[in-house]
């Protein structure tokens, strides 16, 4: 849908992003200050890359090799900056009509997004959620072929976020418009996107369907970015239906299948949700020294020591009676092999 | 008290010179301020420095330099004289030139700050909504910088009204020909006509308070908007 390969040198920073999204909603995921917003500016045409290309479907927006650089005015891309970028001197309606393609569409979209009642108010008179809807309406009224959203939900509270997620998905279905969304919230990425691009320090490092990327992080840093905190060193012993990993204690664990060879040095990632119910072919029986048990409303959070590392495991509340867990004592868990990512370890990192 | 023809002439001349000067300052200063705010080019700093110079130079020195340039033997003055038999110095046009040069930097500095204060993101959004540079300037940048620009314009008008040193050098002090309000006050005081001087001073004071009041009001509006 969107193919991007751009390079741009800036003062003390180099942007080098490459991805080819096969989804309708692409998430650019990275910590703040790693060049996600710059990538959006390059796609929208505000920032001209030094070299590379940007294609929207078959349409070339930028191609340094062919000397193509479509100006932002002609790209047909809706851009929502982080603070929504509403014009403070214009009312909600005037904002929405600013780039309107056909008469009457702005009014229609304002009604569709439930901000018609506030059409005569100025941006400083409306709430964060209303600002966002207005900015979205303004972008849609210009009939864009791609929407760029820069951390659109970061300033909003949780319940409003969930409402707006639904709204955004509805709009996408209705307008059939691809979206690129910048986010540093992994839950948001999984909620909204069907293609994930990871950007680290200005460089894209991995892309794919979100769950594919999540369960196959390319390197330990990517795993950390994705919120995987408990990494345990190991060595590949066998590759079959699973990857068999020998851990420091000598115990072997069945983990997720991947492209590994025997003796490869790897990390395995213990995920909170890898707890399964019984010892089938697909699970590993492990003993964990329990440090603490936090009885939550929906899940029970258990921290413990496994292979010398602190890990966290989550149980659904309803399964709590099946487990005999007490802080300070050892407990038995079954970890699903499919849910244990294996991550390649670089040789340099060992030294 | 009856106002003497000299006093009335000086008020009229000052208003005419200052209004014309402010118009010219606006017409030339706005493009200059936009250029300095949004474009990068060679000698940008030099251009900025040249415009700002009259702000730091003693007005008499500014006037002297203008006299050298626009005088009968000056680079521009001689050409104007030859081609159009037109002289700037020692006419009311000299007063206009002096006021213009003295008040241009005040407007350009203020307008530039206002233009640069407009959030770049809004400009970028306008581009993605299909608006070109000129349309964006008039629909987004100018309305948002408006208050600051108007305030700077009022200040530059006030500077033109108060211009003395450079005017004295370029236009001279010729009664009923080039005596602007400040020059007339100076003449009245030096002739010992204190009553008339006081009246003109009162007029100036009321005018100045009005200017400060208006500028303050505009800058408050800028903050809340």
Image (spheres, grey):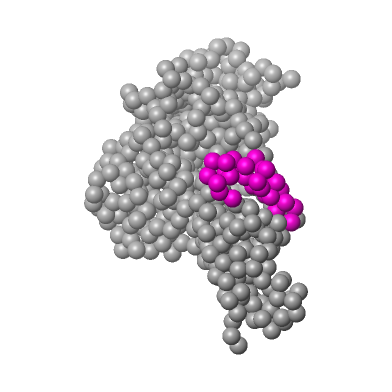
Of A273 and A210, the residue lying toward us = A210
Of A125 and B83, the residue lying toward us = B83
Viewport quadrant of the N terminus of chain B: bottom right
Q: Residue at x 38, y 42 (%)?
A: B131
Image position of B86 with respect to A189: above or below: below
Q: Would residue B195 appear left or right of A212 to someone viewing this image? A: right
Of A281 and A65, the residue lying toward us = A65
Is B8 one of the magenta-colored residues?
A: no
Q: Is residue A110 visible?
A: yes
Residue B134: image quadrant is: top left
Image position of A315 with respect to A267: above or below: below
Residue at the bottom extreme of this rendering: B1
Of A252 and B213, the residue lying toward us = B213
The boundaries of the magenta stretch are B59-87
Q: Would residue B58 appear left or right of A172 to someone viewing this image? A: right
Q: Position of residue A88 (x, y in %)?
A: 45, 57
Q: Residue at x 33, y 61 (%)?
A: A119
Image position of A282 with respect to A133: above or below: above
Q: Residue at x 64, y 19 (%)?
A: A346
Q: Is residue A158 visible?
A: no
Is B68 one of the magenta-colored residues?
A: yes
Q: Position of residue B76 (x, y in %)?
A: 62, 42
Residue A201: image quadrant is: top right
Image position of B166 with respect to B205: above or below: above
Q: Position of residue A220 (x, y in %)?
A: 60, 27
Q: Dominant secondary structure of the magenta stretch? A: helix
Q: Residue at x 70, y 76 (%)?
A: B188
Q: Position of residue A75 (x, y in %)?
A: 37, 33
Residue B154: image quadrant is: bottom right
């Amino acid at each position: 849908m969107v193919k991007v390969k751009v390079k741009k040198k800036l003062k003390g920073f180099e942007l080098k992003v490459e991805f080819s999204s096969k989804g309708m909603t692409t998430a650019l995921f990275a910590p703040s200050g790693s060049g996600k917003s710059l990538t959006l500016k390059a796609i929208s045409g505000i920032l001209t890359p030094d070299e590379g290309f940007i294609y929207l479907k078959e349409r070339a927006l930028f191609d340094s090799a062919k000397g193509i650089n479509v100006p932002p005015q002609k790209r047909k891309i809706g851009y929502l900056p982080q603070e929504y970028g509403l014009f403070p001197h214009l009312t909600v309606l005037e904002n929405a009509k600013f780039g309107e393609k056909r008469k009457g569409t702005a009014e229609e979209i304002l009604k569709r997004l439930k901000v018609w009642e506030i059409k005569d108010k100025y941006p400083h008179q409306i709430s964060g959620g209303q600002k966002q809807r207005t900015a979205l309406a303004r972008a849609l009224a210009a009939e864009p072929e791609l929407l760029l959203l820069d951390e659109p939900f970061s300033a909003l509270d949780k319940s409003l976020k969930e409402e707006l997620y639904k709204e955004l998905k509805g709009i996408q279905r209705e307008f059939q418009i691809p979206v690129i969304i910048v986010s540093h919230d992994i839950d948001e990425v999984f909620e909204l996107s069907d293609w994930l691009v990871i950007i680290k320090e200005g460089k894209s490092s991995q892309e794919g369907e979100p769950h594919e990327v999540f369960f196959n992080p390319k390197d330990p840093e990517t795993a950390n970015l994705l919120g995987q905190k408990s990494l345990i060193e190991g060595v590949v012993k066998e590759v079959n239906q699973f990857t068999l990993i020998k851990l420091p204690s000598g115990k072997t664990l069945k983990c997720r299948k991947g492209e590994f060879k025997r003796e490869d040095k790897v990390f395995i990632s213990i995920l909170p949700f890898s707890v399964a119910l019984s010892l089938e072919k697909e699970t590993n029986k492990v003993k964990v020294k329990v440090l603490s048990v936090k009885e939550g409303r929906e899940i029970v959070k258990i921290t413990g020591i496994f292979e010398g590392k602190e890990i966290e495991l989550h149980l659904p509340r309803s399964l709590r009676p099946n487990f005999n867990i007490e802080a300070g004592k050892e407990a038995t868990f079954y970890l699903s092999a499919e849910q244990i990512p294996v991550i390649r370890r670089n040789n340099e990192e060992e030294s | 008290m009856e106002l003497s023809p000299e006093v009335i002439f000086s008020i009229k001349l000052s208003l005419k010179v200052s209004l014309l000067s402010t118009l010219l300052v606006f017409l030339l200063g706005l493009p200059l301020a936009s250029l300095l705010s949004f474009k990068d080019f060679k000698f940008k700093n030099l251009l900025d420095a040249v415009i700002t110079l009259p702000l730091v130079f003693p007005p008499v020195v500014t006037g002297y330099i203008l006299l050298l340039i626009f005088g009968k033997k000056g680079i521009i003055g001689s050409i104007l004289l030859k081609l159009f038999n037109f002289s700037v110095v020692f006419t009311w046009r000299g007063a206009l030139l002096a006021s213009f040069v003295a008040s241009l930097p005040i407007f350009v500095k203020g307008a530039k700050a206002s233009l640069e204060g407009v959030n770049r993101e809004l400009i970028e959004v306008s581009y993605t909504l299909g608006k070109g540079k000129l349309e964006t300037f008039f629909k987004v940048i100018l309305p948002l910088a408006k208050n600051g620009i108007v305030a700077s314009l009022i200040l530059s008008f006030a500077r033109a009204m108060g211009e003395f040193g450079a005017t004295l050098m370029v236009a001279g002090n010729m009664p009923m020909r080039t005596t602007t309000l400040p020059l007339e006050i100076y003449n009245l005081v030096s002739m010992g006509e204190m009553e008339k001087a006081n009246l003109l001073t009162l007029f100036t004071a009321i005018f100045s308070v009005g200017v400060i009041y208006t500028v303050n009001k505009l800058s408050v509006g800028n903050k809340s908007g």
